[in-house]
Image (cartoon, helix red, strand yellow):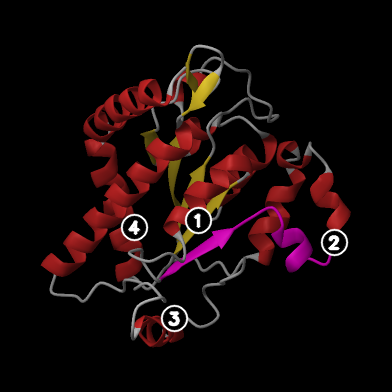
Amino acid sequence: MTAQAYLSMISELVAKVGTSQADGVKGAASLITAALDRGGVVQAFGSGHSEALAMEIAGRAGGLVPTNRIALRDIVLYGGQPRAVLEDPGLERDPGVAQQLYDLAPVDPRDVFVIASNSGVNGVVVALALLVKERGHDLIAVTSLEHSERVTPLHASGKRLSDIADVVLDNGAPYGDVALPGQVGAVSSVTAAVLAQMVVAEVVARLAEAGQTPPIYLSANIPGGHEHNQLLEARYAGRIRRTA
């Protein structure tokens, strides 16, 4: 249970996940590249700690500008519900929230979705995935297949996120999302972030190969970065939101 033990474990797991999911990364990059080519954006969602994956995709330096983050708090920020609803620990298990999130988001039929959930079984995640597919969007899932297959789906459909997505990226997290004795050493946020960055790198490479200038964020904390980002964001006015 030492820091070095965690470093050794996570280094090995990152390498394993990066190698084993190479084909999935290419598949995800294909869906995203196609969406950008047709004028769509990437809609990213994750609840709980899986929101970190959505943050890794949408609105960060080195990432794609045409990206939008959907979050549970959108029902308060944009839907007018009282802040107290966010204190409900069962919120992410409520499938009815999925429709609200979809309706409140600036979604276009050309968009592609990325949904992250380590367990892949909670109501809002599965309901949103089903809705996304019903509406004709391509869907990429980031989940732990080991964990998901060992727990009971909580949605009435009996489906898991991995059953619904067009491309599934397995974050390699073990059951319970911890890999060291003593129930410590969470891994899913680390491996999911690596997968997200691999996908973005692959998308950028494909856009560049096609003779396009990839719409990439610069750090706002370098000279000219803020101005660069503002110019690119203007291309997607009304399509992407940047909130805390």
Between marks 3 and 1, how big is the CA–CA gap?
16 Å
Q: Residue shown at 34%/67% (left/top)?
A: 36
Is residue 136 visible in the rendered image? The answer is no
The range drawn in magenta is 66-80
Q: Residue shown at 62%/65% (left/top)?
A: 244
Which of the 4 image quadrants contains residue 71?
Answer: bottom right
Q: Crowdedness of circle 4 by 10 Å Cα count: few (<14), some, many (20+)?
A: many
The disc labelled 3 sits on which kind of residue? Glu
Secondary structure beneath label 2: loop
Instruction: Work out whether mark 3 precedes mark 2 in sequence or the reverse, and give the earlier one.
Output: 2
Q: Which circle, 2 or 1, is nearer the viewer?
A: 1
| Left or right side of 168 for 127 | right
Instruction: Work out whether mark 3 precedes mark 1 in sequence or the reverse, and give the earlier one.
Output: 1
Secondary structure beneath label 4: helix
The disc labelled 4 sits on which kind of residue? Ile
- The percent coordinates of residue 88 (x first, y second) are 83, 42
- The percent coordinates of residue 191 (x first, y second) are 38, 36
Of the pair 213 and 28, the residue shown nearer to us: 213
Instruction: Work out whether mark 4 precedes mark 1 in sequence or the reverse, and give the earlier one.
Output: 4
Point out which mark residue 81 bears: 2
Residue topped by disc 4: 32
Are discs 4 and 1 less than 8 Å apart at CB? no
Instruction: Work out whether mark 3 precedes mark 4 in sequence or the reverse, and give the earlier one.
Output: 4
